[in-house]
Image (tube, helix red, strand yellow):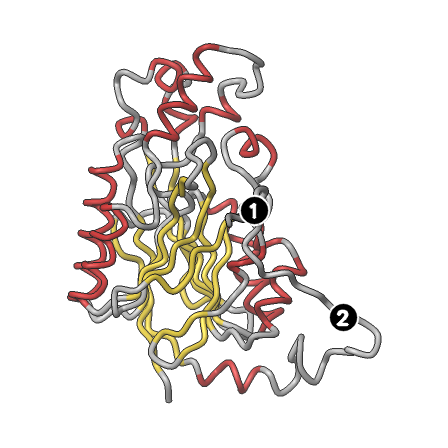
Amino acid sequence: MTVLRIAAAQIAPALFDVDATTRRVIASIIEAGQAGVALVAFGECFVPGYPAWLSEGGGARFEDAELKDAYRRYLAASVRLDGDHVQAMRTACRDHGVTAVVGILERDTAGGSGYCTALVIGEDGEIALAHRKLRPTYEERLVWAPGDGNGLRTFDVRGVTCSTLNCWENWMPLARTALYAQGTQLHVGIWPGTDANTRDITRFVAQEGRVFMLSAGARMAFADVPDDFELGRRLGEEAWFRNGGSAIAGPDGQWVLEPDTATQGLVMADVDIDRVLAQRQSFDPTGHYSRPDVLQLSVDRTRQKNVTFQDA
């Protein structure tokens, strides 16, 4: 029997405050290590917080000074993979023997665009994966650049094959198929943080892929919005409310943990990975129940670049 203790860190970011939010990530990694957790996951774009002002505050107003300043402030709070904040998370994972899936706003080297990235740090402190969201959803395209297929890869957690996707890209059937084909046994979906997002798809993906699915959602409240962010404060309390909704479903599509809207902290359970193989007796979406002679998928996993330099 292969048992893995997994958890969602159902906590809140401090919007725009990358230092404070990183400290919260590290505190949860330490708590997870002390609780014997092998993998802990945080919400989508947890560092430095989800940009709720876009949908609630008329985010598509063109040449609007407030929206431009919000974008400037948001991008200034982004993190680089080789930066100090990620290094601090890596150290915590290594020191406490925990794999972490952390939603971050990743800043590229050019500096003008940010990516919604699911960053995976192994228990050895090394970066195992940095998956940039393939298609930001609706108004998210105003602040996040589209990613690529480079992160459509699995990663190992103590001999268990794992995968991850950001929020609504979990609804993309071909993205899921690419991960099923690599033998994922535990799929991690990271979300801004409401049970409305996690209640249906968590069980569906688990049963479709015959995998365990961990959905990790953040909590957030008006108190986590800085006082000097006038645009955000005008939206009021309801715009910023996030109740978490973290959940775990098994490979039979049944709940291990139903969506949790009460816990402030770790939402965790022990899962028996051997159940994955048992459930694949009747259905394996990219194995014995596939028809590669009829249906095929081609995946480009190169990191996309818009400029290539050739120097003498």
Judge left or right: residue 181 versus residue 275: right
Residue indicated by mark 2: 296
Residue 164: x and y in percent read: 48, 60
Residue indicated by mark 1: 308
Judge left or right: residue 101 versus residue 312: left
Residue 239: x and y in percent read: 43, 26
Task: Look at the numbered discs 1 and 2 and tell me whether their residues touch, using CB distance below 8 Å.
Answer: no
**Total numbered labels:** 2
Residue drawn 67% across the image and 76% down it: 286
Q: Along the polypeptide, which appears first: circle 1 or circle 2?
A: 2
Judge left or right: residue 230 versus residue 163: left
Amino acid at the residue labelled 2: Gln
Residue drawn 54% across the image and 67% down it: 206
Judge left or right: residue 13 versus residue 135: left
- Residue 229's tag is none
Residue 139: x and y in percent read: 57, 30
Residue drawn 54% across the image and 54% down it: 303
Q: Secondary structure beneath disc 2?
A: loop
Q: Please tell me how crowded label 2 is: few (under 14), some (14-19), or many (20+) other residues with Cα within 10 Å.
A: few
In terms of image quadrants, where is residue 289? bottom right
Residue 43: x and y in percent read: 39, 48
Q: How far apart are marks 1 and 2 (CA)?
A: 31 Å
